[in-house]
Amino acid sequence: QVRLVESGGGLVQPGGSLRLSCATSGSIFSRLTMHWYRQAPGKEREWVASISDGGSTNYTDSVKGRFTISRDNPRTTMYLQMTSLKPEDTARYYCHQFSRGTAWWGRGTQVTVSS
């Protein structure tokens, strides 16, 4: 059974920083592309960033230069370092992988950017 558990969310002021973690188990983590998504209230879930098994990264335009995705293969954990946070970054953040022919999602961690 694949398990994804996000953590690190919270309430932060505009301009602040947070680091999200996604701890995984049950899959061959080092061989998988991993993704972060987010969903704001009343909006559809949107892709935020991806990191390939080789470490190549991609970001949605709205977070480029502010967010950094990374991975620690021995710890089977993925991270999202978020800086210069804006109120529009407020959302529930989810990690995602596709393995064993199935799309796996965590339960998410809430990020709220507000003064």
Image (cartoon, grey):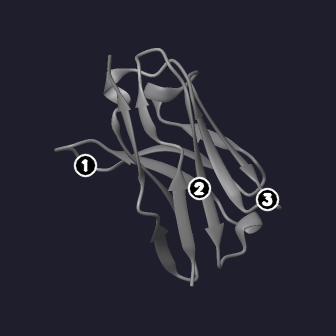
Residue 55 at x, y percent in the picture: 75, 48
Q: Nearer the viewer, mark 3 or mark 1?
A: 3
The quarter in which the N terminus is drawn is bottom right
Residue picked out by circle 2: 22
| Element type at mark 3 | loop
Residue picked out by circle 1: 44
Name the mark on residue 52: none
The relative height of residue 28 versus residue 112 in the rendered view (above or below) is below
Residue 28 appears in the rendering: yes
| Element type at mark 1 | loop
Residue 97 appears in the rendering: no
Residue 37 at x, y percent in the picture: 43, 49
Cα distance, mark 3 to mark 2? Answer: 12 Å
Residue 83 at x, y percent in the picture: 55, 23
| Element type at mark 2 | strand
Name the mark on residue 73: 3
Say left or right for 109 vs 81: left
